[in-house]
Image: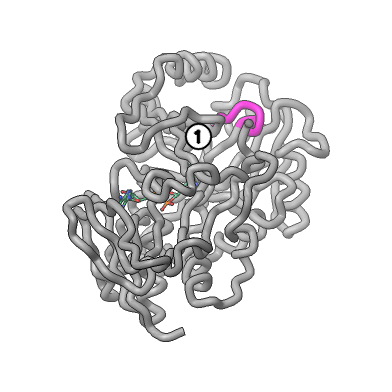
């Protein structure tokens, strides 16, 4: 493909990694975002995201994530600092693991991929990871080839690389509408009425995408998911060697969490049905959610239950109807490629997602793009770790 003028809308992890990769392939690239960057409301912007290949029976995402883990290690080397903390990941079941269960099937797939995972029963769990005292999770396993990434810092680093490589960053500009000439998209118009012309527009605006491209409103929706940060008086039991990132019967309960940050705060969140949100409005955690967290902590981590909440956030997912990402040309708008639909599980693919998007643009084969193609609605399903 000849070098093109490409405008990428949205500087979260999808947009920024695509902009960087496209620039490295010789295209002239502009990246636009209202900012400040990394945008505080972007899904990608947070202190941490879990990096795991454990995906139930879904071998597509398991293999894709499995390929990303060495790429995360390479990013650490390239950056000369640790963005990806390979602390391992604890996947716990609410009962004995059985075929068809998320933990059982993840265990099978991980073993088949040669991962040296460590089976956990209740006693072993308490001995290895003493904060887990409740007995509520009698089975599961620890996967050492996993961990968490400093997601906001990763995006900031990618933005620095992108700038250095010559991506033009339009921070502080917001796409209002596509600039359409007949059936062709010729660029975008900002909310201040400025036109930016390009050969190709990539809309990677995460949860804002269905608002910007309203015809996608059936396939994509914005939901808010609660994320809480607690400050225990004694953070030692929650340090990474004793308290790696975890998911507790996640397909049924939605609960997952992270080790203490260096400031002693512990992040716990729920990956569930979520709350419908207008991404342009206020994102307020509904009142009842404090009670959910309180009940979960009282049962699972009594030591954390009374700890002050230092931050609560309703974080936005861009859910696709089937939980798969959405990376393809819009069949009705020539020159427009949509790259979104992270559906609450997209960050771990950061090291390879820019290539997936760029290959789609350049018409090159990519081993991972098949599930992300334009598709019609079908029976609603969701990512396997997610309660419906
Ligand atoms: C609470 C939570 C927990 C998660 N946990 C994990 C996890 O543990 N592991 C994992 O792998 N994934 C996780 N994810 C999913 C992951 O974070 C997302 O899939 C990924 O970050 C999506 O990136 P994105 O670039 O598509 O969207 P975003 O990061 O939201 O970026 C979209 C960008 O578009 C910009 N934008 C919006 N409107 C406009 C406009 N009009 N013009 C220009 N720009 C615009 C925004 O400012 C923003 O910067 C989680 C997500 C959330 C919310």
Q: Which residues are magenta?
A: 248-255
Out of 209 and 183, give the one closest to the viewer: 183
Q: Is residue 366 left or right of residue 378?
A: left
Give the residue number, with chain letter if any, for mark 1: 257
Which residue is located at x 52 percent, y 60 percent? Answer: 327
Q: Residue furthest right?
A: 99
Q: Position of residue 278 (x, y in %)?
A: 37, 34
Q: Position of residue 277 (x, y in %)?
A: 41, 31
Q: Is residue 323 left or right of residue 224?
A: right
Above/below status of 242 relative to 1: above
Above/below status of 336 relative to 245: below
Which residue is located at x 42 percent, y 38 percent? Answer: 316
Above/below status of 37 relative to 7: above
Q: Is residue 223 left or right of residue 190?
A: right
Query: Where, quadrant-wise, is the C terminus in this rendering?
Result: top right
Q: Is mark 1 within 8 Å of ligand 1?
A: no
Asked where in the image residue 43 lies, by quadrant, the reply is top left
Secondary structure, mark 1, is strand
Which residue is located at x 45 percent, y 38 percent? Answer: 222
Q: Position of residue 365 (x, y in %)?
A: 60, 75
Out of 43 and 230, give the one closest to the viewer: 43
Q: Per the image, is 249 magenta?
A: yes
Q: Per the image, is 281 magenta?
A: no
């Amino acid at each position: 493909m000849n070098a093109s003028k490409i405008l990428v809308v949205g500087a979260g992890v999808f947009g920024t990694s695509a902009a960087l990769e496209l620039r490295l392939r010789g295209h002239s690239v502009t990246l636009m975002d209202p900012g400040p960057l990394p945008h505080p409301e972007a899904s990608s912007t947070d202190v941490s995201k879990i990096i795991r290949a454990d995906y139930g029976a879904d071998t597509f995402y398991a293999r894709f994530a499995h390929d990303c883990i060495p790429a995360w290690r390479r990013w650490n080397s390239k950056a000369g600092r640790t963005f990806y903390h390979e602390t391992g990941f604890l996947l716990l079941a609410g009962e004995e693991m059985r075929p068809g269960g998320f933990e059982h099937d993840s265990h099978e797939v991980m073993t088949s991929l040669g991962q040296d995972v460590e089976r956990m029963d209740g006693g072993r769990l308490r001995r290895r990871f003493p904060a887990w005292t409740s007995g509520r999770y009698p089975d599961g396993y620890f996967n050492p080839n996993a961990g968490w990434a400093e997601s906001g810092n990763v995006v900031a680093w990618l933005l620095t690389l992108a700038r250095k490589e010559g991506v033009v960053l339009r921070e502080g500009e917001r796409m209002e509408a596509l600039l359409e000439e007949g059936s062709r998209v010729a660029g975008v118009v900002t909310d201040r009425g400025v036109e930016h012309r390009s050969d190709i527009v990539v809309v990677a605006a995460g949860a804002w995408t269905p608002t910007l491209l309203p015809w996608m409103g059936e396939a994509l929706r914005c939901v808010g998911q609660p994320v809480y940060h607690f400050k225990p008086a004694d953070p030692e039991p929650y340090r990474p060697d004793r308290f790696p990132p975890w998911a507790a019967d996640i397909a049924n309960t939605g609960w997952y969490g992270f080790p203490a940050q260096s400031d002693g705060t512990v992040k716990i969140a729920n990956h569930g049905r979520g709350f419908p949100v207008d991404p342009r409005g206020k994102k307020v955690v509904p009142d009842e959610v404090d009670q959910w967290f309180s009940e979960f902590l009282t049962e699972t981590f009594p030591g954390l239950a009374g700890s002050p909440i230092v931050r609560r956030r309703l974080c936005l997912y861009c859910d696709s109807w089937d939980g798969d990402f959405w990376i393809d040309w819009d069949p009705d708008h020539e020159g427009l490629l949509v790259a979104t639909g992270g559906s609450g599980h997209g960050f771990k693919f950061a090291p390879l997602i820019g290539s997936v998007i760029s290959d789609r643009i350049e018409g090159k084969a990519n081993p991972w793009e098949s599930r992300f193609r334009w598709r019609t609605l079908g029976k609603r399903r969701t990512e396997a770790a997610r309660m419906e």
